[in-house]
Image (spheres, rainbow, N blue to C red):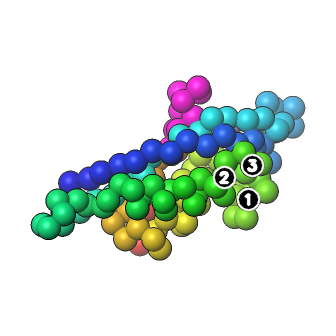
Amino acid sequence: MRIYKEFGFEAAHFLPSAPEGHANSRMHGHSFRAVVWMEGEPDPDTGLIREFGSLLDVLNDVKAELDHRCLNEVEGLSVPTLENICVWIWGRLAPRLKRLSRVEVHRDSCHEGCVYDGPTD
Ligand SMILES: [Zn+2]
């Protein structure tokens, strides 16, 4: 069984690897939407995999590191692709959410996103 919670953040970025003159090589912004999944059996006493309020507290801490920032300037995100943002969010959440099972990051206005199920090893 899995639960999820979403949070949004607004951020600017550019992609250093984009070819010179490509739009992605210039600073621009997106509305990002992250979806965080947790997996497991509900606690028999509470009926919950995780209480959503406490999950929101964790997600708000991560959001605060990303929202209204230039992602390239965030430590560990010098190449802020969707893929790398997923891995970065996973790294922030995993120590605090032991049942973390998936991180998605979407750019809905572009109809694109990335899904990360965590490290394979
Ligand atoms: Zn972009």
The amino acid at mark 2 is Leu
The residue most toward the left is 44
For the residues bearing labels 1 and 2, Cβ distance under 8 angstroms = yes
The amino acid at mark 1 is Val
Q: Residue at x 37, y 71 (%)?
A: 98
For the residues bearing labels 2 and 3, Cβ distance under 8 angstroms = yes
For the residues bearing labels 1 and 3, Cβ distance under 8 angstroms = yes
Q: Residue under circle 3?
A: 69
Quadrant in which the C terminus is drawn? bottom left
Horizontal side of residue 45 vs 3, given as left or right: left
Q: Position of residue 79 (x, y in %)?
A: 72, 53
Q: Residue under circle 2?
A: 66
User: Please, what secondary structure does the residue beneath circle 2 have?
Assistant: helix
User: Please, what secondary structure does the residue beneath circle 1 have?
Assistant: loop
Q: Position of residue 49 (x, y in %)?
A: 25, 61
Q: CA distance from mark 1 to mark 3?
A: 8 Å
Asked whether 111 falls inside the magenta stretch, the response is yes
In this rendering, does residue 53 appear at all? yes
Q: Residue at x 73, y 59 (%)?
A: 74
Q: Residue under circle 1?
A: 74
* Relative height, residue 37 to residue 40 (above, below): above
Horizontal side of residue 36 vs 109, given as left or right: left
Q: Tell me if mark 3 has few (under 14), some (14-19) or many (20+) residues whose alpha carbon lies within 10 angstroms of its own.
A: some
Q: Magenta segment, which residues? A: 106-115
Quadrant in which the N terminus is drawn? bottom left
The amino acid at mark 3 is Arg
Quarter of image, res 68: top right
* Viewer-closest of 111 and 57: 57
User: Please, what secondary structure does the residue beneath circle 3 have?
Assistant: strand
